[in-house]
Image (spheres, rainbow, N blue to C red):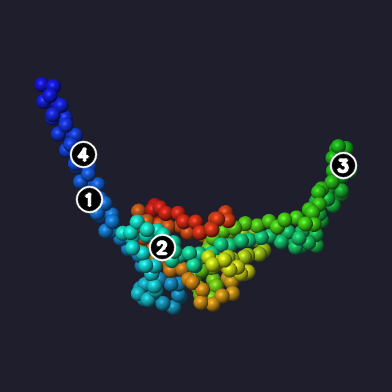
């Protein structure tokens, strides 16, 4: 009786294992052959999207390859840039001095009304050789003559913008416009025949499609993160 039960249990376990293997093989074949659908177009107010979709080049990626992320990153790196921002504190301090009283002047004016232990208080002056304050972010080139899209929070509050390309070349940029609600900003460098990002149609994307984020946050160069659209 015990041997018969053990035999039945063995065949049931074997059937479950074979079923799992079969399902896994079917899923692998389906996923390796399926490719996401993309429609790429370049920004141009004078042409419809359908025409641009037919004319604009697309990134050549074999999604069935295990190296498709590396292939995509290699093609995208040339139009992804690092943006360094800085604040001219000396100039801003000069502007404040010309437009309003300093905190120390305000304090002296009301000193007689304050407790004795606070009457000798002095504000510290900013040292002459103070280090510049700045930040970093990423962006991508959208036009061959140097227009670059980045985030508004990257450029907000900054006075100077330095763009570093993938090949290491650096250029000074000017701020063109900011949309804080959408967290988008446009800056421009002097350039000609620069590598341009291949833009897609977000209306054609589907939840669950593979996505890749490429940039240089926190000073790191050429970072790549893969995931799915959700």
Q: Position of residue 130 (x, y in %)?
A: 75, 55
Reading the chain from its start, which is encountered first: label 2 or label 3? 2
Disc 2 target residue = 72
Disc 1 target residue = 26
The crowding category of the residue bearing disc 1, from other C-alpha atoms within 10 Å (few below 14, some 14 to 19, many at least 20), is few
Disc 3 element: loop
Disc 2 element: helix
Q: Which is nearer the eye, 121 or 219?
A: 219
Q: Position of residue 159 (x, y in %)?
A: 67, 63
Which of pointers 1 and 4 indicates the residue nearer the eye? 4
**Cα gap from disc 3 to disc 1, whole angstroms:** 81 Å
Q: Are marks 3 and 4 in contact (CB under 8 Å)?
A: no
Residue at 35% x, 56% y is: 66
Does residue 64 sit above or below 197 in this rendering? above
Q: Position of residue 93 (x, y in %)?
A: 77, 59
Reading the chain from its start, which is encountered first: label 3 or label 1? 1
Disc 4 target residue = 17
Does residue 54 sit above or below 152 in this rendering? below
Q: Which is nearer the eye, 4 or 60?
A: 4
Reading the chain from its start, which is encountered first: label 1 or label 2? 1
**Cα gap from disc 1 to disc 4, whole angstroms:** 14 Å
Q: Position of residue 35 (x, y in %)?
A: 30, 60
Q: Are marks 2 and 3 in contact (CB under 8 Å)?
A: no
Q: Is residue 180 visible?
A: no
**Cα gap from disc 2 to disc 3, whole angstroms:** 65 Å
Please indicate whether residue 135 sits to the left or right of residue 93 in the image.
Answer: left
Q: Quadrant of residue 67?
A: bottom left
Q: Quadrant of residue 202?
A: bottom left
Residue at 87% x, 44% y is: 111
Reading the chain from its start, which is encountered first: label 3 or label 4? 4
């Amino acid at each position: 009786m015990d041997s018969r039960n053990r035999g039945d249990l063995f065949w049931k376990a074997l059937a479950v294992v074979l079923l799992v293997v079969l399902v896994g093989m079917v899923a692998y074949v389906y996923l390796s052959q399926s490719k996401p659908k993309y429609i790429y177009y370049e920004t141009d107010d004078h042409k419809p999207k359908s025409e641009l979709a037919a004319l604009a080049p697309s990134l050549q990626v074999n999604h069935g390859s295990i190296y498709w992320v590396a292939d995509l990153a290699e093609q995208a790196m040339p139009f992804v840039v690092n943006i360094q921002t800085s604040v001219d504190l000396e100039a801003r301090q000069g502007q404040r001095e010309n437009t309003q009283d300093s905190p120390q002047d305000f304090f002296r004016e009301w000193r007689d009304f304050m407790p004795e232990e606070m009457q000798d208080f002095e504000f510290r002056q900013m040292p002459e050789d103070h280090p510049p304050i700045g930040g970093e972010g990423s962006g991508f080139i959208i036009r061959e003559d140097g227009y670059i899209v980045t985030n508004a929070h990257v450029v907000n509050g900054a006075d100077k913008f330095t763009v570093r390309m993938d090949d290491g070349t650096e250029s000074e940029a000017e701020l063109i416009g900011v949309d804080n609600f959408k967290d988008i900003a446009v800056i421009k460098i002097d350039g000609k025949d620069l590598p341009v990002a291949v833009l897609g149609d977000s209306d054609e994307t589907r939840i669950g499609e593979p996505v890749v984020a490429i940039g240089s946050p926190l000073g790191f160069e050429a970072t790549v993160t893969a995931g799915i659209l959700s």
